[in-house]
Image (cartoon, coloured by chain):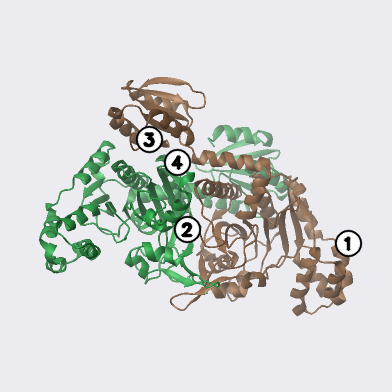
Chain colours: A brown, B green
Amino acid sequence: MMQPLPGFRDFLPPSCAARNALFACWRETCRRYGFVEWDGPILEPTELFQKKSGPEIVAQLFNFTDKGGREVTLRPELTPTLARVVATHEREFRKPFKWFSIAQCFRYEKQQRGRLREHFQLNCDILGDASPAAEAELIALAIDLLRAFRFTEKEVVVRLSDREFWTDLLRAHSVPEERWSDLLSVIDKSEREPRDKTAAQLGSVAGPVLEVLDGGGRSEKLEQLVDALRLRGLADFVKIDLSIVRGLAYYTGVVFEVFDRSGTFRAIAGGGRYDNLIGQLSDGAVGLPAVGFAMGDVVLGEMIAAVPAARERMTKLVLNAQALDLYLVIAKEERRPDAVRQLQSLREAGWRVDYPLTPTKVGKQFQIAEAFGAKATLLYGDEWPSVKMKTLATREELLLPNEDLFTHIQRTWSH
Amino acid sequence: MMQPLPGFRDFLPPSCAARNALFACWRETCRRYGFVEWDGPILEPTELFQKKSGPEIVAQLFNFTDKGGREVTLRPELTPTLARVVATHEREFRKPFKWFSIAQCFRYEKQQRGRLREHFQLNCDILGDASPAAEAELIALAIDLLRAFRFTEKEVVVRLSDREFWTDLLRAHSVPEERWSDLLSVIDKSEREPRDKTAAQLGSVAGPVLEVLDGGGRSEKLEQLVDALRLRGLADFVKIDLSIVRGLAYYTGVVFEVFDRSGTFRAIAGGGRYDNLIGQLSDGAVGLPAVGFAMGDVVLGEMIAAVPAARERMTKLVLNAQALDLYLVIAKEERRPDAVRQLQSLREAGWRVDYPLTPTKVGKQFQIAEAFGAKATLLYGDEWPSVKMKTLATREELLLPNEDLFTHIQRTWSH
């Protein structure tokens, strides 16, 4: 009773401030790229995910039957909802859509490091543009989302691949289409398996596939994508790696995953092109090419904690988000009504101001002001109708007639 | 399949921007009052709510059995979670806690106007302070949350009551404690019932209770609370109304509800003092007096839409949140690489910038720039290495060498 459910997090004020700082950073970066925010329901019909997600996701659905007998699921990912929403509202917006969302997602599985039963996921998608420019724009955003936390090309890398490269190869070797999904899954796992096991599973196409996995493959499409990112000064962040396939069933072209260079963590983000999903979901009524990615808060949070520059920036953001501007020190209880009156005006002027609700020793009030990160205290005591303002960082004190307080603060602090 | 589940909302970009503007306004106002943000899990053990919530909430729980056989519930309210969290982490924070949260909450019931199956709720609580100053501080916050949306005392009113007033009265008339809850519920509903029906249900205490309901009651505690709010200039927003009791079982003292004066909408917010809940939840280990309220996004949204000043402010916030700073118009495709290079630098400088991913007619590019609310366009064409900057509001045009672009924009726009 005194603990949250396994795999669910309580966000106490410091961790909530960190979470919000992360969200704010995500939002700000997406907005710089001209992306607008949307959101869908946390609960959806189970059917929506069974049809469109990869087998790993379906096996771990957080699904149940609701009181009305509906089969429903706490969303494991956002893309099927995006497809549903866009198929319905496609005509209301100018294409291409550049949409992002910060969505809590759920899975029912055993807890592991970096994998809880809930996490928050940033989803960024460009819909209605089939050009390679959309991939470049999206991957540039993924990189800038990491740079916003002070990560450099020394810490993170985007591994680029192309599903179409593989399906072209399988088609060229006359592999029947119903075997593609199994073979793609073998390729996806090849990095963590001995070569002979992979070869056995690949059967007749073992030769050409292994040649590519051993570095003998070339994709002009991916090389052009790297060039497009070079134009933006971001080429050092990316690397062509054809062994990436990604588990989700709906990808159709370029796919990518973002990793830390040290190989300590799970993928920070992943995505790709999924040109058929919206058409499938709308039974062909609306066909929109699409490319998107997701980035989770848990692995990113672990990365931030592990990289000093990122951690430092996050600490600063958290402190700024939580700090007060002013703390009112009531040194004489007779002055309380005067302090409360000014409290209200100071807050109305937009400052973050707190004060002791009940009589409190002056020394303790100063401690509270420090603990809450107040920039300055205002002391209401014998000096009234003047107020003593103390800047806590410098210990500077200044006696101000109470009616001059506002202009003084407004003038000294950039708001 | 193409619709969300009944009672759940899709947030398309305009409604998501409105939701975010509402959240931002809530956050900003709470922070001015020195409140810090926290959050709990969206899913909790059902037991947490069965024990502590009022009968209306328990009847409408969105509960189910998870795959591990646990009885779980999509949270209907945040207060039991707050009590759980605070009982566990009480020693880690300085008292009083001034905490707020913006939490999605759920209920399973038939949909009605202003009541969906999910909504977002702002919760604000002060814990660890039993003084009347805490009530004044909290109600002032509730009022300023409404003033932040430009509501005035002409549109909204906080109705103040006190459960202790009623329990004192029942005790004075020797009503046994096990009957209090039923009688409080009769008092709560009295406004919507004929007097004789209420009288019959009240039985032996009908006389003294009706006298109060007809205006014959006086509460010194509430009068002092009004005085405390008068000190802050907020007395016109409040009204003593002893007929308010509130359904939740855990309230112990002052209770209040916020309504629109026209009586068109459901309660915008409601709350009160609940001094025993945290003690009960921790089996007496941690006793913390508490006072809090919740404000939902649905009724508030309807109110904002209905009041011109509020609607106007919201429209402005939504436009600001969605607008671009710059749109790059590519008039000559040869200039695309130059434009993309500057795109990257402009975004890195913090501006919101977009551009056409694929070749697009110049006229259409200007239309897109207008549609996305860009402040200015930068035209890349024959003028290169100069760029033509056009301020869309004034139609002013300026030819700038591309290397001067940054200093010019930085200088003209306050960022």
Residue marked by disc 4? B94
Residue marked by disc 3? A355
Tell me the residue at 58%/45% (across/down): B352
Disc 4 crowd rating (10 Å Cα; few below 14, some 14-19, many 20+) is: few
* CA separation in Å, label 3 and label 1: 69 Å
Q: Judging from the image, what secondary structure is the residue with disc 1 in?
A: helix
Amino acid, disc 3: Tyr
Question: In the image, is A68 to the left or to the right of B194?
Answer: right
Q: Judging from the image, what secondary structure is the residue with disc 2 in?
A: loop
Vertical arrangement, residue A122 with respect to residue A331, above or below: below
Residue marked by disc 2? A2
Tell me the residue at 14%/51% (across/down): B217
* Residues tagged 3 and 2 counted as in contact (Cβ below 8 A): no
Q: Earlier in the sequence, mark 3 or mark 1?
A: 1
- Residue A394 versus residue B402: which sits nearer the camera? A394
* Residues tagged 2 and 4 counted as in contact (Cβ below 8 A): no
Q: Nearer the viewer, mark 3 or mark 1?
A: 3
- Residue A24 versus residue A85: which sits nearer the camera? A24
- Which chain contains the residue that carries disc 2? A
Amino acid, disc 2: Met
Amino acid, disc 4: Arg
Q: Earlier in the sequence, mark 3 or mark 2?
A: 2
Disc 1 crowd rating (10 Å Cα; few below 14, some 14-19, many 20+) is: few
Residue marked by disc 1? A216
- Which chain contains the residue that carries disc 4? B
